[in-house]
Image: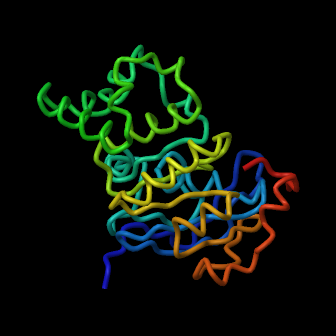
Amino acid sequence: MSKTVMRFDDVCFSYPGGREALSHVSFEIAEGEKVALVGLNGSGKSTLLLHADALLMPSSGKVEIDGIAVTDKNAAKSRMAVGMVFQNSDDQLFMPTVEADVAFGPRNMGLDNGQIAARVDEALQMTCCSHLRDRQPFRLSGGQKRMVSIATVLSMQPRILVFDEPTSGLDFAARAQFISIVDRLPHTVFMSSHDMELVNRLCTRAIVLDRGHVTYDGPVDTLPYPTLTDLNDISYETDS
């Protein structure tokens, strides 16, 4: 039986002012699983992912990574196990070169130059970005930025990868490259997406979130939202 690497136990979360974004959310993700988080705009997906990466803390309930409850005191350690790739790559790339961006995380971990160089080389190879190492990130295409963003996370060697709408804004070629790369990664993957073709290609399991509640957790091929991609323009009053 595979080890549980992420667990949400009756998690509730409300933003200042009392708006509830997550309501009694419970699920487990096993090592090596690729799980999709789906739901309409405003259903709470981004809020949930921020809890997975210890960027938000539950109002009640708990999140566990590798069996350890995430708290304010150990949040930094939890983030070492969970690497998050944000929807907007410009939020993740800020150094003068691709190489410097990918090296930023390992350097801040206190690794020596040899270890940093090895991690940068490996992460760039895994994302097919070795030829971009001397480029300026802001001059890259959207697809190239997305791949480099993934490389910045892989260089930290997390066990779990979290993606927030990873194919948003990508053209056909960049989307195909993303699918090919992530499909080969051995990591546990947890991603939110409206791209149901992507979900079907990469994931075997889906969790449906509806106004902060989990309404489905099971195989992708029996997902009860076959027309979800046709409803992307529908938004609840929440903004999460």
> Residue placed at 32% from the left, 31% from the top?
130
Note whether 140 is above or below 176 in the view shown. Answer: above
Number of marks in picture: 0
| Coordinates of residue 27 in the picture (x, y in percent) | 53, 75
Residue 58 pos. (x, y %):
56, 58
Eyeballing the image, is 20 above or below 88? below
Which residue is depicted at the point 16% across and 32% down? 111
Q: Does 153 appear above or below 13?
A: above
- Residue visible at 26% across and 33% down? 120
The quarter of the picture where the N terminus appears is: bottom left
* Location of residue 49 (image quadrant): bottom right
Percent x, y for residue 237?
87, 52
Query: Relative to 101, is 201 on the left or the right?
Result: right
Q: Is residue 156 above or below residue 33?
A: above
Q: Nearer the viewer, residue 219 or 11?
A: 219
Q: Going by the image, does 120 lie left or right of 26?
A: left
Locate residue 189: give its quadrant: bottom left
Q: Residue at (55%, 33%) from the top-left corner?
A: 89
**In this view of the protein, which residue sits in the foreground, 239 or 19?**
239
Colour logic:
rainbow
Residue 183 placed where, x, y %? Answer: 43, 60
